[in-house]
Image: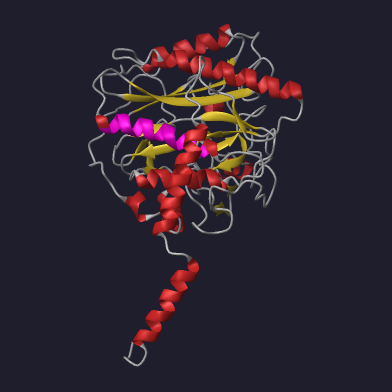
Amino acid sequence: MLVRTPCASFKASGSRRCMMLTPVRCRLHGLHGHHGHRLHGLHGLHGSSRARGFFTAAMSLFTSSSSKKKHWSAREPVLIPFDVSPMRLVPASIRKPPYADTGVSPPWNDTAQIAKKAEDKTAMRKAGALAASILDRAGALAKPGITTEEIDIFVHDTCIENNAYPSPLNYGKFPKSVCTSVNEVICHGIPDARELVDGDIVNIDVTVYTEDGFHGDCSRTFLVGESVSDAARKLVDDTEEALWRAIAVCQPGAPFHAIGAAIQDFADTQSYGVCPDFVGHGVGQQFHSGPAVVHYRTVRRGSSGTGFGLMGNAKGKAGIDYMVAGQTFTIEPMLTLGAVKGRFWDDDWTVTTTDSCLTAQFEHTLMVTDDGVEILTARPGGERLDVEGAAMRMKELEASLARTSPSKSAAKSKKKKAKKATKGFGV
């Protein structure tokens, strides 16, 4: 699940939303860039037009022209708000996270969450397995005629049955136990009375807080019925592929910016947009913490440590700039068929693409091991753990890009020759 980062100065300012986006530092609010809920809310960041001009200029340094292609014609919004039922209750016997009774999101903590004790690793595996199991069964309900409210009821009741708290519930006053994002909704869709229809796609984002005091977080985009378009099916498949490619770069010493590079490079080859306003995050005993895991390229190709053969190239702060063994975090890319920016509904949660194009998302909770990474929210019964295949496909893409991109020395030589050739011609 995504989240916007709350801060003390945000509340003091009295403003409704922080105007800045990660990685831009807001003088008033500090560094933001995570998920969004009402008070900087659930997964992902958002920003106003005031911040977007600067952010767009900065992003243009790292985004290739292919990612700006649009192969989705803008359409009128399909979704409209439906009735939302009252917040469901949780028995007093269930262990609750700190925000459960107050609805106040805890302050953002930049410290990475690292499971050092064996019992903590076991607890994280338990939380991840429960979240994955509930998501798998919730996805089976995604059929024509079923409301997203019914999916929420199932998730809520199943959490309680397993002595767990549904983490989204009352996080920044989010009113439901799961996020359901249909068609053009980027994230944080609130379950309501709308029935799913044949041809929809819906992302279901499940997070649980177990009796051990740990969160497990995962999401998947499901096809509804038999009439889903070829473009939508491909978007869903490719978004999952982007997640696998990102997971493939994870191991001790790998820089976190390699995750965004892997996702962006693949998305560019397919002409998808990568939503920059929402990020992955540390997860464990806290729902959200550092690092902010961005899903787009933040370092120029060819810069030190930007390739995929970057293991052991540990630079910066452990757990924030590069991965360390025992660290737990999420990766949750959102790809679009058109615009990458979002607009908020009046509920202050639901975020849709500005041109109403379709968008898809996949998410896993991961734990870095001594020699790689463990997927804590892998699907029950054997998920397509295609990390090795994704790594191979990334190497092929890297080689292809290297062949088509001139080296620095070659470009310098070419410039020198051009200058020599034009000398004396008044150029």
**Residue reaching furthest to the bottom:** 424
Residue 121 placed where, x, y %? 70, 24
Secondary structure that dominates the magenta span:
helix
Using the rendered view, name the quadrant where residue 159 is placed: top right
65, above or below 72, in the image? below
Q: Quadrant of residue 185?
A: top left
Quadrant position of residue 274: top left
The residue sitting at 30% across, 49% down in the picture is 69
111 relative to 414, above or below: above
Is 97 placed left or right of 410 in the picture? right
Is 35 contained in the magenta span?
no
On screen, residue 248 above or below 306: above
User: Residue 163 versus residue 79: which sits nearer the camera?
Assistant: 163
Q: Is residue 346 visible?
A: no
Residues in magenta, as a range: 231-246
Counting from the top left corner in percent of width and height, residue 62 is at: 45, 55
